[in-house]
Image (spheres, rainbow, N blue to C red):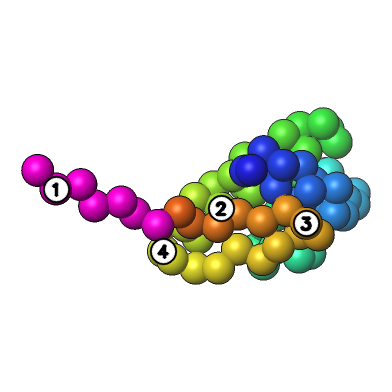
Amino acid sequence: MIKEYIEAALERAKYELIDDGEPYYGEVPDLAGVWATGKTLEECRRNLTEVIDGWIVIRLRRGLPIPPLGSCRVEELERLEISG
């Protein structure tokens, strides 16, 4: 579920060259605040993957919604209470 969501996000990523020591810039417009840079396009894509993963974890921990990307969704499972 999370792997598929990250792949869907990477498919929507936009990349550009910027005037910086790490000239490759990538962002996922559908996910607010998700961006990364890298010295190569591959490095930027790897960094962006890590950012998306962390973004998902933070939103789940804070109980914030994660927007669907096409048919991909990440939903928090209800916590099970175990007594005994």
Q: Is residue 6 above or below residue 30?
A: above
State which tag comes first along the sequence, 1 or 2.
Answer: 2
Task: Name the side, left or right, on which 64 lies relative to 30.
Answer: left
Q: Are marks 2 and 3 in contact (CB under 8 Å)?
A: no
Q: Give the Cα distance between marks 2 and 3.
A: 16 Å
Q: Give the Cα distance between marks 2 and 4.
A: 10 Å
Q: Quick one: 8 or 34, which is closer to the camera?
A: 8
| SS type, badge 1 | loop
Q: Quick one: 9 or 23, which is closer to the camera?
A: 9
State which tag comes first along the sequence, 3 or 1.
Answer: 3
Q: Looking at numbered disc 1 in the image, what kind of residue is underneath it?
A: Ser
Q: Which mark is residue 38?
A: none
Q: Which mark is residue 62?
A: 4
| SS type, badge 4 | loop
- Does 32 lie within the magenta span? no
Q: Looking at numbered disc 4 in the image, what kind of residue is underneath it?
A: Arg
Report which residue position mark 2 lands on. Answer: 56
State which tag comes first along the sequence, 4 or 1.
Answer: 4
Task: Name the side, left or right, on which 53 lies relative to 31.
Answer: left
Q: Which portion, as a residue range, is magenta?
A: 78-84
